[in-house]
Amino acid sequence: MAENLLQHPITSHEEIIKLIPQKPPFVFVDTLFEYTSLTGVTGFTVPGDNILLDKNRLSESGLIEHMAQSMSLHRGYQGSLSGQRKPKTGFIGLIKTVEIFYQPKVGEKLKTYVEILHEIMNVTSVSARTENKMGEVIAISEMKTVTVE
């Protein structure tokens, strides 16, 4: 198991925004807890003004976007370590699988574990698992993301 390369979690909104290409109001991550070259752990507290809420719960689309942005945050931190000034833009190229077991309510804290499975040129296959604060799995996915220069 690779060692976490973060000295302490990144929780500053300004720092998170520097590490991802997305900008408010379309930001679905607020913490980077852990980073290794192939894995990351992110966090997100569902805000009451989120644009993808469905009756005070994060919609399925919001959960998928959170998982994709968790990968984006991992990539952005990786880029910052190598001196990149701004994060590369990426998008979901393919969702291979997604299962959503629970839609979190406003105020709930999520923790998402991402792992790079394969990488060929600018296409990355990644798995994500999102848990609630009790450690219960609320969503899992495997997707391919495409990074553009």
Image: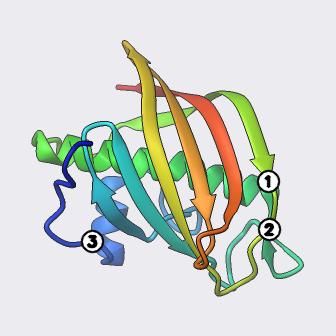
Q: Which mark is residue 103?
A: 2
Residue 82, horizontal then vertical, whole percent: 11, 39
- What amino acid type is highlighted by mark number 1? Ile
Question: Up-down: is 71 above or below 53?
Answer: above
Query: Residue 15, position in %: x, y?
Result: 27, 68
Residue at left offset 37%, top offset 51%: 40
Disc sitting over residue 100 in the figure: 1
Residue farthest right in this picture: 55
Residue at image location 75% in from the left, 81% down from the top: 105
Q: Is residue 126 above or below residue 18?
A: above
Cβ atoms under marks 1 and 2 closer than 8 Å: yes
Percent of width and height locating residue 100: 79, 53
**Would you identify the image quadrant in which residue 57 lies?**
bottom right
User: How far apart are labels 1 and 3 at the CA level?
Assistant: 26 Å
Residue 94 vs residue 79: left or right? right
Which quadrant of the view contains residue 18? bottom left
Q: What element carries label 3?
A: loop
C-alpha separation, residue under disc 1 versus residue under disc 2: 7 Å
Of residue 122 and residue 9, the one placed in the foreground of this image is: 9
Residue matched to label 3: 9
